Amino acid sequence: MRRITRRGFTVAALGAASSLLAEGEATATGRPGPRKIHRELRGMWLATVARRDWPSAPGLAPAAAQRELLAHLDTAAARRLNAVFFQVRPTADALWPSPYEPWSDCLTGRQGRDPGWDPLGFAVREAHRRGLELHAWFNPYRVAHHTDRGLLAPTHPVRRHPAWALPYGGELYYNPGLPRVRRFVQDAIMDAVRRYAVDGVHFDDYFYPYPVAGQTFDDDAAYAAHGGGFADRAAWRRANTDLLVRELSARIAGTGRRVRFGVSPFAVWRNRASDPAGSATRAGVQTYDDLYADTRRWVREGWIDYVAPQAYWNLGFEAADYAEIVRWWARTVAGTGVDLFIGEALYKAGDPAQPAAWQDPAELSRHLTFAGRYPQVGGHIFFSAKEVAADRSGAMARVVADHYGKTASRPPR
């Protein structure tokens, strides 16, 4: 199924700001990509897991929590951004009154406790008032940063269905190999899609968990029950992730609303040493092999509206050069109709623990300059909100000065 009814809505309509991008790599036909005008997406992630960006502390009074959230939205507008990717389901819980999962503990410090207000509804209204898109960011399978089911809210689905979750690496995860789990995860997400005027549904890089040395994700029972007909367990796991993406894609499209569906994966699909179609990288993790996420297929099949690879390395980084990541993804989306946004590691800028390149405030600005050579690149998303505000090294201010000279407003709904 090709999802073409909403394709390009956001990028084609985004705001008043536009930039003329130079010719990039050849298109799928082998001819050079044409020069064309893009209206760019300028986004930031606003993370709530472990209260990374917001709220600053558990149990804030509603008015105080709202002031902090408004400050992030005001900062986005002041930086001339036009989209916020707000994490509303960080650990199989919710930042809205969900009938499927309990209130998130990031709000009150206790999972299931009503905070007395609706953060998602508030964020959608206030973002739109500021000319910002609000994309609802969901983590599909992470349940908890511990393995004790007794610490979950009494109403949590895992308390009612213990077999739905597996411990791994000191955390709990929903088992992607169970059809009931995949359907439930989609139902929980679709509740928010139907109830709120969100502009997008967004996944990050977490599907099957990242590998942990010496540990096994024990899905033997699910594989025995549902893995027939697959060449091996890896192929079955990839098919499970494909089903989540393809089915949710169809359900979002079925609403008839202009809600875009996108994924921000770890940026390396496969290294070229593993697959001739892969990138000229030597990354230790490959989404296809380790997270069982065939992100390249999702683009080629048109199951997603956009892809936003987390290109969290500097220009010239030996194992995974930012330039190679951008080139590979530009080739991958060419001719598909899937939009390409680049995830940017603002959090590394000025961090003394990072390589020397990240101590230069101009590094991120150079990223945007380089990506601007490729007409397939439709914008950038910065991780994350507290760095957009604090801007430790001035890297964000440099991006704004060099690339965001005019305000980019949200498209009409």
Image: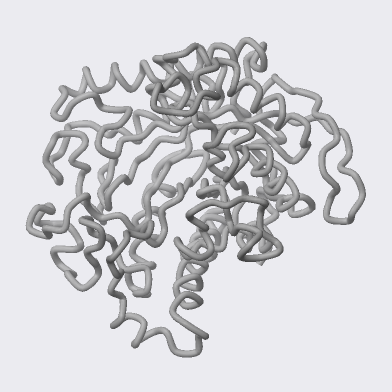
> Residue 163's spot in the image, x, y percent?
21, 73
Quarter of the image for the C terminus: give it: top right
> Residue 27's spot in the image, x, y percent?
84, 50
In this rendering, the answer to whether 239 lies above or below 145 is: below
Report the side of 29 relative to 265 (left or right).
right
> Residue 410's spot in the image, x, y percent?
59, 26
How many numbered discs, if any?
A: 0
In this rendering, the answer to whether 182 lies above or below 41 is: below
Residue drawn at (33%, 73%) of the image: 180
Pick the residue in front: 348 or 399.
Answer: 348
In this rendering, the answer to whether 199 lies above or below 69 is: below
> Residue 179's spot in the image, x, y percent?
37, 75
Describe the colour scheme in one phrase.
one colour
Answer whether residue 118 is visible to the viewer in this image. Answer: yes
**Location of residue 211 (image quadrant):** bottom left
Report the side of 4 relative to 311 (left or right).
right
Residue drawn at (53%, 49%) of the image: 263
Pick the residue in front: 72 or 49.
Answer: 49
**Location of residue 117 (image quadrant):** top left
In this rendering, the answer to whether 343 lies above or below 402 is: below
Quarter of the image for the N terminus: give it: bottom right
